[in-house]
Image (cartoon, grey):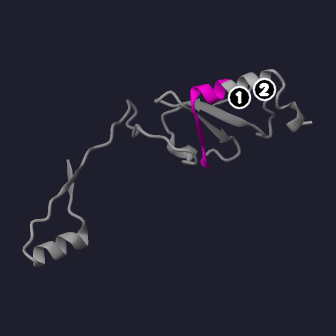
Amino acid sequence: MVEYHGGMQLHLGLQMGLHVPSVKLREPPYDEQGAVVMERFANGMRAGALTSVTWTKSSHSNATGNCVELARLPDGSVALRNSRDPQGPALIYTPDEIAAFVAGARSGDFDGLIG
């Protein structure tokens, strides 16, 4: 367990003879490979920080990497990243949002965007 007293606050508190409470930080959880398991995910977080996920890209992707990749996160949400920038930002979606997008793509809702 790590104890942190906060630099300046501790120094001033000791000079004034005050009791400065410590804040206990807990050790982060780790997976079997020793990677830190993240408990919260946020839109725009670095995709490279998602180390314990498996990224999947469409079989329709071309050899130049013009595609997006998706990964299921431990909390059930789905991350999306640009395959040309794997360390860049990830967009995080709920399973329902991804299901609605896939259904729309299957039914042709977005065909006008690529033609």
Q: In this figure, which residue is indicated by the disc labeled 1?
A: 101
For badge 2, the amino acid type reads Ala
Looking at the picture, tell me which residue is in the foreground, 65 or 88.
Answer: 88
Q: In this figure, which residue is indicated by the disc labeled 2?
A: 105
Q: Secondary structure at mark 2?
A: helix
Residue at (28, 44) in percent of width and height: 27
Give, as a single range, the part of the protein colored magenta: 87-99
Is 89 a magenta residue?
yes
Residue 88 screen position, x and y as percent: 62, 49
Q: Which residue is outermost to the right? A: 115
Give the distance between the C-alpha atoms of the residues marked 2 and 1, in whole angstroms. 6 Å
For the question of whether residue 59 can be seen, the reply is no
Q: Quadrant of residue 106?
A: top right
Residue 83 screen position, x and y as percent: 69, 41
Looking at the picture, tell me which residue is in the foreground, 56 or 33.
Answer: 56
Residue at (55, 48) in percent of width and height: 46
Residue 15 screen position, x and y as percent: 11, 78
Q: Which residue is outermost to the bottom? A: 15
> In the image, 70: left or right of 107?
left
What is the quadrant of the C terminus in the image?
top right
For badge 1, the amino acid type reads Phe
Mark 2 surroundings: few (<14), some (14-19) or many (≥20) residues within 10 A: few
Dots 2, 1 in contact, CB < 8 A: yes
